[in-house]
Image: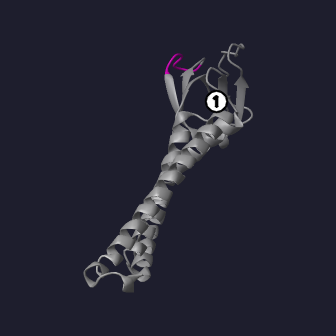
Amino acid sequence: MKHYLPASMQQWIEPINTGLSILLILAVAWLLRLLTRRLLARLGRHYTLPAQIEMAIRRLSNFVIGTVALVAILQALHVQASVLWTAFTGFAAVGAVAFFAAWSVLSNIFCTFLIFTTRPFRLGDQIELLENGEKPGLKGVVTDINLIYTTLHEVGGPVDGTLMQIPNSLFFQRGLRRWRGGDAMPTTVHGDG
């Protein structure tokens, strides 16, 4: 096709092809984001995922789609693969360090996802987080569950009526007693002596 065009137009063929390739990559990325958003909304309704979890998954998928689109655009612009690989491994190393630095936060976020999917307790339930089988632990009514903490309105403890924020990962490290919302919970505190 290049040979059939006048010489003055042949210099524009390569930039036009590159521009069309970039537009195609952007269109595919946009469609993937749209499909992912709809799929996540459907899964969120089916599994009753909280908005925060759905938003976190949506942001992660947008990041992955955007990164892949960026790499594809850079390849369309003829950036060398060795440069892309070097940049990727550098970012991966920094990401790995950040991952280990933020392990406790990520652990709590993962445990939040587990709380919402396995349902060991729900908002309004009265729970007791046990120290061990013999000693009573933290008691309260679940008033909020966010990405890092579960908030309990304390019942029967030394400072009855206060709000406690417990890291979500703690619920998977200790025993848990649960009374469904509205059921009675014992309010006596067991002493050591």
Give whichever of 137, 147 is nearer the camera: 147
**Residue 26 colored magenta?**
no
Q: Which residue reaches farthest bottom? A: 3
Give whichever of 3, 52 is nearer the camera: 3
Give whichever of 7, 134 is nearer the camera: 7
Q: Is residue 131 visible?
A: no
**Where does the magenta region start and end?**
157-162
**Image location (x, y in percent) of residue 107:** 56, 49
Give whichever of 52, 118 is nearer the camera: 52
User: Please, is residue 19 above or below residue 124 in the view?
Assistant: below
Q: Is residue 31 left or right of residue 22?
A: right
Element at label 1:
loop
Which residue matches tag 1?
137
Q: How many labels does the image show?
A: 1
**Image location (x, y in percent) of residue 63:** 46, 55
**Image location (x, y in percent) of residue 114:** 65, 42
Q: Is residue 16 left or right of residue 40?
A: left
In the rendered image, which quarter is residue 186 located in?
top right
**Image location (x, y in percent) of residue 132:** 70, 37
In the rendered image, which quarter is residue 79 located in?
bottom left
| Amino acid carrying mark 1 in the image | Gly
Q: In this view, does 147 lie to the left or right of 12?
A: right
- The quarter of the rendered structure image containing the C terminus is top right
